[in-house]
Image (cartoon, coloured by chain):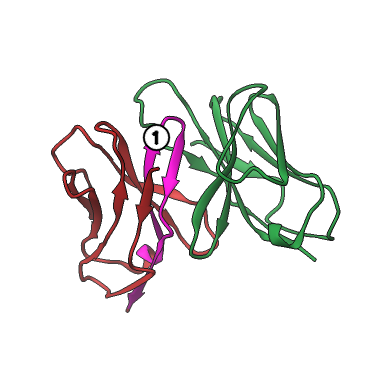
Amino acid sequence: DVKVTQSSRYLVKRTGEKVFLECVQDMDHENMFWYRQDPGLGLRLIYFSYDVKMKEKGDIPEGYSVSREKKERFSLILESASTNQTSMYLCASRETSGTSYNEQFFGPGTRLTVL
Amino acid sequence: AQTVTQSQPEMSVQEAETVTLSCTYDTSESDYYLFWYKQPPSRQMILVIRQEAYKQQNATENRFSVNFQKAAKSFSLKISDSQLGDAAMYFCAYRINYQLIWGAGTKLIIKP
């Protein structure tokens, strides 16, 4: 089974703090994604990485950065956390070989609260 | 720009009955992929069913089936014989390149 893990289920941070959210997948998937999930808005893509050291901005990259130094790990960084970044953050991974509509596999999510 | 609309924020169904969740999308592409994902309370998002646009036959997975109307850009999900474990948020998504474009979700409540 594919497993996608995220470093924390719940996180509480102060405004202005630097926050690191870690995501690890164990299936050698090329693509990895960070989403933000807010009620009534569905999932919005923050960043994605199609391979190691490669990254692309999604729909809402402002205030975030990412790092992918190893294939299995994709980190989301909030350089200076703000209250409007309070949200659920979901990581996902996907392989690119085989059928072209391979599903994305999701982690359990990190619920971040910025005070 | 591609958009996905789920017009039902919440739906409820009696256990063992059938329910249909609606999804419409907007695209100028002719070949694409559509998905329904399920997010149970406090649990991980999982794929329910997927459809390739060039296939006319509607996808089915056990109790889950879709009604794909390409001309109308509609992709509804039918759940037959609803079970308590079907209670979840359901998201419709459209795939373009690497990305998925997501609807806002429909909360499905199962009444025992």
Name which residue lies at 68% across and 45% down. A62
Question: Which residue is outermost to the bottom?
Answer: B112
For numbered disc 1, what is the local secondary structure? strand
Which chain is tinted green? A
Height in image: A107 above or below B99? Answer: below
Confirm whether the magenta stretch covers residue B84.
no
Of the pair A59 and A45, the residue shown nearer to us: A59
* Prevailing secondary structure of the magenta residues: strand
Looking at the image, can residue A47 be seen? yes
Chain containing the residue with disc 1: B
Residue B103 position within the rendered picture, expressed as x and y whole percent measured from the top left? 40, 54
Name which residue lies at 47% across and 27% down. A95
Q: What's drawn in magenta, residue-wise? A: B86-111
Q: Is residue B50 left or right of residue A38?
A: left
Question: Which residue is outermost to the left?
Answer: B57
Going by the numbered disc 1, the residue's amino acid type is: Ile
Q: In this figure, which residue is indicated by the disc labeled 1?
A: B96
Height in image: A64 above or below A69? Answer: below
Name which residue lies at 38% across and 38% down. B95
Residue A61 position within the rendered picture, expressed as x and y whole percent measured from the top left? 64, 42
Residue A52 position within the rendered picture, expressed as x and y whole percent measured from the top left? 64, 21
- Please tell me the colour of chain B: red
Height in image: B71 above or below A40? Answer: above
| Quadrant that contains the C terminus of chain A | bottom right
Height in image: B11 above or below A34? Answer: below
Of the pair B60 and B5, the residue shown nearer to us: B5
Q: Is residue A19 left or right of residue B72?
A: right
Name which residue lies at 69% across and 24% down. A70
Q: How many marks?
A: 1
Confirm whether the magenta stretch covers residue B101.
yes
Circle 1 crowding by C-alpha within 10 Å: few under 14, some 14–19, many from 20 = some
Residue B70 position within the rendered picture, expressed as x and y whole percent measured from the top left? 18, 43
